[in-house]
Amino acid sequence: MTIPRDLGPGPEGHPVLPVLPNFRRSSATVERMIENLGPPAAPSPAGHAAVRPVENLRRPRVLLPADALRDTLMRALVAAAGGAGALMMAVALALLALTVDAGRAPSVGLLLVMLPLGVTTALTLLLSVRFAIVALATARARVEISEHGLRVVGALSSRDVAWHEISAVRTQVVHPVHWLTATLRLTDGTQVVMPVFDRPVWTYGRRSGHDLRTLRRELRRQQRPRP
C-alpha cells in the first residue's frame, strides 16, 4: 500500500497539508529529520526565512571506554587471582608462625622466609584491591559532554565540571590507582581523573584516541569568545 505524502489542499489560503516529513537528500540529517517532525514553522517577517520554534535538541554526548566489557572482565579476574594468591600466602605465613614454640623467638632462617612472604602478601593484596577498584571504575566510567560542562563518572562518585573551570585536558598522566590515564586540569590547580580513559598495560604505546581529541576540540570551542 502506498502512503500519500499529503492530504491534498488545505483550507483556503493555506498550502498542501503534509502527512510525512520531507526526507529528501538535502535534508537527510538526524537533526533536520527531528525538526521536520516538530510543529510547523512560525510566520516570519518579509524577506526572512521561516523560523521553526524547535527546542534545543542537543543532548549530552556520552564517552565510554573503548572496550569496557573486556577491560572490566580482565581487571576483575586479575583482582580475584590476586586476592586468592594473597589469601594463600597469608595462610602459609600463619602456618609458619605456628611452627614457633611458645615462648621462643623464631629462628633467623624462619624470619628470612616469613619477612619476604609477608611483604609479598601485602603487595599482592594492594594490587588486588587496586584492580578491583579499576574494574568497578571501568564498568561505571563515562564522561557526558553538554553545553554546560562535563559530568565525570568514576568508580564510587561523579563530578560536574563547568567549562569555565577547565584549563586543559591532560593525557599520559600517571596516577597511583588508575596508572596511565587522562585528567582535567582545573583553573584552581587541581585535577579530575577521568577513569573512562584508563589505559590497559598493552595499550601504553598507542596514541591518544579519537574521544580525547573530540574532548579537546569541544574545550577549545567553549573557550572561544562568544559574540
Image (cartoon, rainbow, N blue to C red):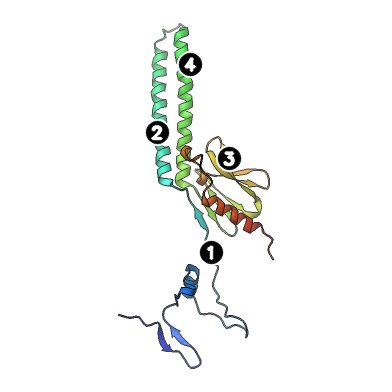
Residues at discs 1 and 3 in contact (Cβ within 8 Å)? no
Label 2: few (<14), some (14–19) or many (≥20) C-alpha neighbours in 10 Å: some
Q: Amino acid at mark 2?
A: Ala
Q: Quadrant of residue 73?
A: top left
Q: Which residue is mark 3?
A: 173
Rendered location of residue 57, percent (x, y): 52, 67
Is disc 2 placed on a helix, strand or loop? helix
Task: Tell us which disc is closer to us: 4 or 3.
Answer: 3
State the CA–CA distance, disc 1 to disc 2: 42 Å
Q: Quadrant of the C terminus?
A: bottom right
Q: Which residue is mark 4?
A: 115
State the CA–CA distance, disc 2 to disc 4: 24 Å
State the CA–CA distance, disc 4 to disc 3: 34 Å
- Marks 4 and 3, the one that precedes in the sequence: 4
Label 3: few (<14), some (14–19) or many (≥20) C-alpha neighbours in 10 Å: few
Q: Amino acid at mark 3?
A: Val
Is disc 1 placed on a helix, strand or loop? loop
Q: Residue at x 66, y 54 (%)?
A: 164
Rendered location of residue 150, percent (x, y): 57, 53
Q: Is residue 106 visible?
A: no
Q: Is residue 5 above or below residue 25?
A: below
Rendered location of residue 92, percent (x, y): 39, 19
Disc assigned to residue 58: 1
Q: Residue at x 55, y 67 (%)?
A: 56
Rendered location of residue 105, percent (x, y): 47, 7
